[in-house]
Image (spheres, rainbow, N blue to C red):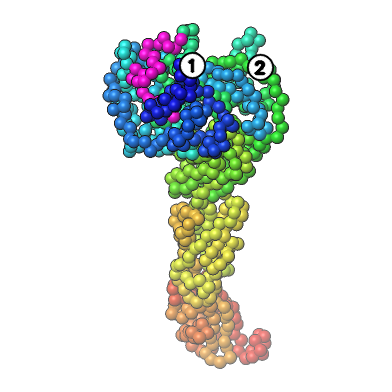
Amino acid sequence: MPNCRSLRRAISHALNNQFETLDRRMLLCADPHNLANLPDEVAGMFEGGHITAQQYASLAPEIQAQIDPHQISDSFDQPPIDYDAVLGIPLHPDGPPAGEGGEADNLPDFFPGLTGSVSVDQTSQSGRTLLRFGTRVHNQGTGPASLISGRPGIDSIPTGAPITSWVNPDGSQNVLQGVYSWNGSSFVLSYSRAAGRFTYHSGHGHFHFDGYAYYRLRARNGDGTPGAYVTRGDGTEVVGTKTGFCLINTTSSFTMENGQSSTTLPGYSNSSPYNNQPSMSCGLMQGVRVGMADDYSSGLEGQWIDVTGVPNGQYFIEISLDGENAVLESNESNNAKSFAYTLNVNNPGGGVPADQFDTGGNNNALAAATDMGVLGTLTQTGLSIHYGQDFDWFKFEASSTGTYTISTIGTSGNLDLYLYDAAGQQLRASTGTASNESVSYPFEMGQTYYVKTEGYNSTQVSNYQIAWALKPTVTNSVDVVDGSEVGPAPASVVIARNGPTTSPLTITFSVGGTAQRDVDYTIEADGLISPNTISIGDLQSTVTVWIRPIADNVAEPTENVIITVNNSSVYVIGGSASAQVNIADAPPTVTGSAFAFDVLPHRVILDFSTNVGASLDLTDLLVTNLDTQQTVPADSVTYGENRNRGTFSFAGALPDGNYRAVLSAAGVTHAFGLPLTGDATLDFFVFAGDANRDRSI
């Protein structure tokens, strides 16, 4: 019998399909090791725990045998896939005739296994204690677990598939499960169904099947049965990861739950073409064939439960497969199994400190998201993913409508960034190999969104920050609409912004209207930094702009001032950009009055603040002899515009007595029709021969 090396070499040269080569290599004799056992030049090819398919193909077979196939990036520049040609036209393109899982269909049946021993890891994550273990996904069903996806515009959608596109708006990939029927000699595609999503990790170069497994720690009851799920003192559940990995065939047979070998299953085959079961790899065609299994070694990221802070004692490790219930199986009740384990460790010191949002509570779930209010442009610093199952959720309301970015910046670790709508539906994702991620989305003002960050495959990330780059909305509204030259009394507008106030916002504006700046009014504001620039300062959301009229004693109509906020690259204008206020002219007033008696005829003289000559006539003045209550009409009226003086003259000398002259306000207006503010009254007396005006001769 040939040895493993000769088998690998023969397979490497005989098979054209790269992932069939991996399949067979693993099935025959592989035992993947960690990267420490690889030559330095090979270990240096790995980025983010993965090696490209092209790099893998360049290696000698004996080196290939040491690399876990889950760590190899698929080749996405491969030729287009014609799924109808590869899989065949389904027997039932309109779906199962008897409902999903009909008697004619042969479905997969997953159950989990624990491979190897459980080890304690206190070095890969600072300050944390991890229980590492291997996981095996057995398929003891009578049909293959076949999961496929495709590249939009490149790979065809299979006939009868219940999707219209491979890619969703959030960037995730739709996954189809092929349901097969066994006709006694080969498998035939019966129909395709929707089966969850793949997430493409661009930096890792391959797709992950979402919700592959959940790992939890359970208490052990006194009778030896699994008990309650274990929680820490801070209320967080002791769980592993919601792992997403590719599904392939790495183990050729196993003992089924009924005690029989999986090789006894109808349709089982360990040689190509595997009774027409589809090809499977870490790419667009994944799955586990009938009677085979997929092994995940304990050295892979995510193959652990974080037990930091858990008291020593007897527990169970629970492994739950198909955590999102995406795959249709013949038996859905055996996807979770528990394995006894005794914990006996001393917790390490140090570690990544919890950030402010995980102190005295946590924001690990959408329902517990930290409410950031209206955002705005804001950078939240000092964040950390301090242990594997620490998720940072933030809730916010968009400050304006537009396409903006949210990004993370860090110095270490591998961070993934997700954006969700108010209902928790994923909108965007950024899943590179570092801590710098960015998503862009057309936000709508006033709508609620959520951001989530997590360490890739439950790894730690220290001291990162999230930057929201939404523009604030600036509004311009009237505060006091009517100003006046009387007083003078200012009008005002309020310029406001929404969102964070942690930094000043500079706003430019222009001025218009019928009034003339610095002639009819001046502009004042607390944040005025130039004639047409204003700043809303730190910790301020509004600034008031005062329009202060100048009392010029010039007859004018009511004028207006229009303050318009200018467009800018740093804010969005909400509502009308302009706000209009009015400046009322000062009404004419009587500034002085006198009775002239020194020469004839006698006269009543009135001085005015503004020219009212055009409106002044004899009927405006009523003179009454207070002693006799007789009215004494004026004989004529003249107006001197150079001094704004009106003179009412009588026919001659008035008889001795006490008099009162009243100028009616209603009839006296300036050139634009604004009347006096009130009647003007002058009391005087006539006493012939009283040269000193002391009522004596």
Q: Position of residue 526 (x, y in %)?
A: 60, 62
- The residue lying at 56 percent from left, 75 percent from top is 681
**Tag 2 residue:** 342
- The residue lying at 66 percent from left, 29 percent from top is 122
Dot 2: within a 10 Å radius of its alpha carbon, few (fewer than 14), some, or many (20 or more) residues?
few
> What type is the residue that disc 2 sits on?
Thr
As drawn, 575 above or below 551: above
**Which quarter of the figure is the N terminus placed in?**
top left
Q: Where is residue 655 in the image (x, y as percent from the top left)?
A: 55, 85
**Tag 1 residue:** 111
For residue 342, what is the image quadrant?
top right
Helix, strand or loop for the magenta stretch, by majority = loop
State the count of labels. 2
Provide the residue span drawn in magenta.
261-282
Q: Label 2 to label 1, Cα distance in Å?
A: 23 Å
Report whether residue 440 is seen.
yes
Q: Is mark 1 on a helix, strand or loop?
A: strand
- The residue lying at 63 percent from left, 33 percent from top is 125
As drawn, 419 above or below 265: below
Q: What element carries label 2?
A: strand
Residue in front for this viewpoint, 695 or 569 = 569
For residue 357, what is the image quadrant?
top right
Closer to the N terminus: mark 2 or mark 1?
1
Q: Position of residue 99 (x, y in %)?
A: 33, 17
Report whether residue 480 is seen.
no
